[in-house]
Amino acid sequence: MSAPMNVALVGIGKIAIDQHVPAIAASADWTLAATCSRHGTVDGVAAYDDFDRLLAERADISVVSLCLPPVPRFDYAAAALRAGRHVMLEKPPGATLAEVHALQHLAEAQGLTLFATWHSRMAHAVAPARAWLQDKRVTRAHITWREDVRKWHPGQDWVFEPGGMGVFDPGINALSILTEILPEPVHLTGAELEFPDNRATPIGAQLRFSGNVSADFDWRQEGPQTWDIEVETDAGHLALRMGGNVLEIDGKAAAGENTIMGEYPALYARMADLVRTGQSDVDLAPMVHVADAMTLGRRMTVAPFDF
Amino acid sequence: MSAPMNVALVGIGKIAIDQHVPAIAASADWTLAATCSRHGTVDGVAAYDDFDRLLAERADISVVSLCLPPVPRFDYAAAALRAGRHVMLEKPPGATLAEVHALQHLAEAQGLTLFATWHSRMAHAVAPARAWLQDKRVTRAHITWREDVRKWHPGQDWVFEPGGMGVFDPGINALSILTEILPEPVHLTGAELEFPDNRATPIGAQLRFSGNVSADFDWRQEGPQTWDIEVETDAGHLALRMGGNVLEIDGKAAAGENTIMGEYPALYARMADLVRTGQSDVDLAPMVHVADAMTLGRRMTVAPFDF
């Protein structure tokens, strides 16, 4: 066992408190050495509200994990890399593709680790689904990803501002799984995007891809939530349910070699491994599909949305 | 001098007739051996309307040059590569980034040349501008790209359909020059996109990039047309006018080492070189900026537009 590494967590909001803090606390790889946030803090952990000061004062912190919304995240990531720190990015890794390319070049030039995380890829049944599909021919696939934005982002107007991604904020989780499990890549061929009359990002999206693959994203679903991916192949039918956590083959629950670790503990374990082996992991495929949908999709105006 | 290579031109519209056909005719590298189009033909050249039949019957044609609009282009490009032909793509190289990535993988797997052309990069003054900027620090840059869509795309409704790109169809030419001449890459930080009330793509766009770089694209300019890029540096002011064809340094015309060849002859010369040396050239940076603008940009609705 190597000694634990000091990590600073930037952006102490819901996702940091719900996921990052417990994952770090439960890991022997990591010590939460500082936080940086305008308002949020973590009990017993040194709290900064000035990131430059944190970087200047805390040479003992070698890794920075960024949980801010995508638009402000770039400046923090670039500052951390320039200050010689390894960086871990919440999903999506940026507000634009070009800024992530810039971070990749910076990390490479500095010899630092950059990890663009996709937490849904760490869901229990994703690796077994990928393994099962690897030698099969996919004839059809469909994603149904329907949740209630009021439940998951209560009052977070930024998700409906430019760069907030709208329904692609959850939808990119589905796309991160799809791009992980399909044996051949697909590309978008058409989309309809539903923009609420009073908002700058879509609340619903229907996507069509090559290879008979499609997706239905909706952020207006009350009651039970749906995070399903169904894949037809030449050798049977696979379903991933509960956001990648439950696997069914031909309608029967499949045990597979399900990973035991939760999504965020698995991300932090992977980050520890990347830092120790001097590697980066930046796969932009899910974000490319979103950019393609925003470029090629047809915009429709739907009813105004208010929290 | 090597023997000329047979090329087939697919999509015989305005750009093919105005630019591709004369460039091929004037080159010792190329013979226009066939065309494929629903309606257009070229006098004295074998005309097909079925691309699969062309590929099946004409083993003598080693290169396919695609001038179709971006949306239908992928299927032709993929079919040509699968049939073992080198492929040259008009700009933009596709309707989505993911489909161009797929073509790259296909070309690589087949050991074939794929050339995503950016004709404006071949304008006379682009190479001298790049050379002049190489060792300077850019403090500000601004693109003004204002033209009349009625003049350049008369009645072409597809430019306002999803995938037609709207004002980014000319704007991507400016971005192809910008990404070629700047010594350091930039990334989009914000944009406003003006969508006519009756159209699915923008007719105007204002873009802001990192590093104090900005762009003003407009497709409603009547009278004189403007295709200017101004760059302030720590060592003087550069202006590229007339779509990259005229260079000024500190307000004075600069001769530079201007290339003599026209844009399309230069593209075909480069394609001949790529095929003979077994290389590909696919730089997606201009297209990434457009996808980023469509993702991050704020949409405004403006007056309806009709041709």
Image (cartoon, coloured by chain):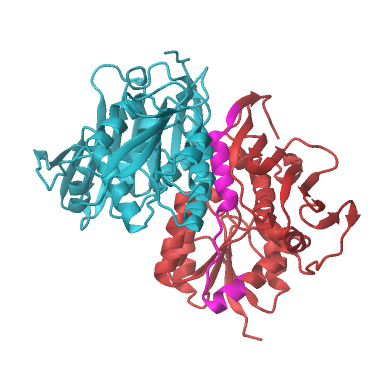
Chain colours: A red, B cyan
x and y percentages locating residue A95 in the rendered image: 52, 48
Question: Which residue occupies the foreground of this view, A216 or B299?
Answer: A216
Question: Which residue occupies the foreground of this view, A274 or A27?
Answer: A274
x and y percentages locating residue A278 in the rendered image: 51, 76
Q: Quadrant of residue B67?
A: top left
Q: Which residue is outermost to the right?
A: A252
Which span is picked out in magenta?
A271-299
Q: Is residue B21 visible?
A: yes
Q: Quadrant of residue B37?
A: top left
Question: Which residue occupies the foreground of this view, B288 or B143?
Answer: B288
**Majority secondary structure of the magenta segment?**
helix
Residue at the image position 87 percent from the left and 60 percent from the top: A254
x and y percentages locating residue A214 in the rendered image: 69, 40
Q: In this view, does B143 lie to the left or right of A54?
A: left
Q: In this view, does B32 lie to the left or right of B114?
A: left
Q: In this view, does B24 lie above or below A52?
A: above
Q: Which residue is outermost to the top?
A: B306
Quadrant where the N terminus of chain A sits is bottom right
Q: Can residue A155 be seen in this view?
A: no
Residue at the image position 75 percent from the left and 35 percent from the top: A220
Q: In this view, does B229 lie to the left or right of B57?
A: left
x and y percentages locating residue B18 in the rendered image: 29, 26
Residue at the image position 70 percent from the left and 64 percent from the top: A264
Any magenta on residue B283? Answer: no
